[in-house]
Amino acid sequence: VYRFLREEDSTRDFFYEGSEAHTLVEELLKKMEAHGRCDPRWEGMLAVLKGLVETHVQEEENDIFPKMKEAFDKDELDAMEEEMLEEK
């Protein structure tokens, strides 16, 4: 879905911010896996991961999705939804 955000001027900033958030989450997950649960920093990394994900979800629900409804027509939104469901 984020690639659609990049294509529209009014949502492009969300694309860059969301892409960075996803990258940070992926990097932190890899770091947590590499260190393992026995590492004393693991719980701290988990807390940071939780905060990143919660903040990102809030931004999607409160900012990104409403802006997408303004920027894209129903057919475009339906296509995005279909693509998301196929990716699952």
Image: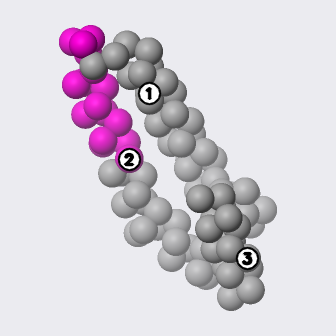
Label 1 residue SS: helix
**Residue 15 in the image: x percent, y percent?**
64, 53
- The picture quadrant where one finds residue 9 is bottom right
* Residue contact between numbered discs 2 and 1, judged by CB atoms under 8 Å: no
Of all residues, the one furthest to the bottom in this rendering is 74
Q: Nearer the viewer, residue 79 or 5?
A: 79
Q: Amino acid at mark 3?
A: Ala
- What distance separates the C-alpha of mark 3 from that of mark 2? 25 Å
The residue wearing badge 1 is: 28
Mark 2 or 1 closer to N-term? Answer: 1
Q: Residue at x 37, y 60 (%)?
A: 58
Q: Residue at x 56, y 73 (%)?
A: 67
The residue wearing badge 3 is: 79
- What distance separates the C-alpha of mark 2 from that of mark 1? 11 Å
Q: Residue at x 24, y 24 (%)?
A: 44
Q: Which mark is residue 53?
A: 2
Mark 3 or 1 closer to N-term? Answer: 1
- The picture quadrant where one finds residue 20 is top right
Mark 3 or 2 closer to N-term? Answer: 2
- What distance separates the C-alpha of mark 3 from that of mark 1? 31 Å
In the rendered image, residue 24 lying in the magenta stretch gets the answer no
Label 2 residue SS: helix
For the record, the magenta segment spans 38-53
Which of label 3 and label 2 is nearer to you? Answer: 3
**Residue 36 in the image: x percent, y percent?**
34, 16
Instruction: Specify the quadrant that holds the N terminus.
Output: bottom right
Q: Amino acid at mark 1?
A: Leu
